[in-house]
Image (tube, rainbow, N blue to C red):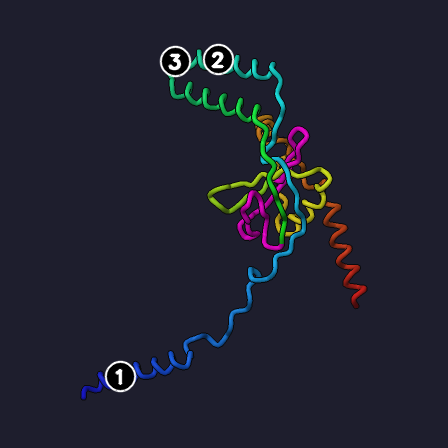
Amino acid sequence: MDPKIEELKRKISELEKKLDGNEIIPKNKVKPSESFAPTKTFLKWKSPSRVFIQRDKLWYLKVATIALLLILFFAFLQDFIVILVICIIVLIAFLLASIPPEQVSHSITSKGINTIDRLYKWAELKHFRINKKEKYLIVNIKTSLKFPPRLEILIDPKDEEKVVRLVGNRLEYEEVDAKQGWLSKMTDGEVIQPKKYYKLFVKSSSKKKSEKKVEK
């Protein structure tokens, strides 16, 4: 018999033995991942799904007047695409100003952040900051996802420090230029600089050190 055929039969026989004895499973067992550990919930709350500012009749009149002037200007230039965009923006602005948002649930857990019935794992989140818009405080979180690129979650002012401490233990606070532009303030709200929260992490680190000394 051809030696090559004999060698091939021998290898097939060895492979069958390994399959029967489960020898092809690696000896170094994979350690249980954190994803299999029980989920710990640190904070739960409900808030409006978006910022809602009650507008008066004067606001609607101003927006409509500005929109009308822009439409007339671009109509003179015969730029009808821009006119269509203006109409869509004004319509969305009127809808957002007239329809109150629904209440949605959020939670910060050991696995990540739950918001609107979806879990965003810590590995999918990059950094965060706190914005203030009108009476609202917003946790603005940058993600590594194509959609959504950012999470904007409204929080109760009484939970501000707790939220910053919990999220700050996992993510870095985003450094933003102190000279924030007016357009950014109008759309996103005023960014709260990280120096406001330094004391939270100083207290946290000193507390951990004291706990270690007690254990010793």
The amino acid at mark 1 is: Lys
Query: Which segment did they paint magenta?
Result: 110-139
Q: Nearer the viewer, mark 2 or mark 3?
A: 2
Cα distance in 3D space between marks 3 and 1: 82 Å
Residue 204: % across, % down? 74, 52
Residue farthest toward the bottom in the current orientation of the protein? 1
The residue depicted at 56 percent of the width and 47 percent of the height is: 126
The one nearer the camera, 98 or 64, is: 98
Residue 42: % across, % down? 67, 51
Residue under label 3, please give it. 77
Point out which mark residue 68 bears. 2
Point out which mark residue 9 bears. 1
Q: Earlier in the sequence, mark 2 or mark 3?
A: 2
> Quick check: 38 left or right of 69?
right
Q: Is residue 106 magenta?
A: no
Q: Earlier in the sequence, mark 1 or mark 2?
A: 1
Q: Secondary structure at mark 2?
A: helix
Residue 113: % across, % down? 59, 48
The residue depicted at 54 percent of the width and 47 percent of the height is: 118
The N terminus, quarter of image: bottom left
Cα distance in 3D space between marks 1 and 2: 85 Å
The amino acid at mark 3 is: Leu
Cα distance in 3D space between marks 2 and 3: 14 Å
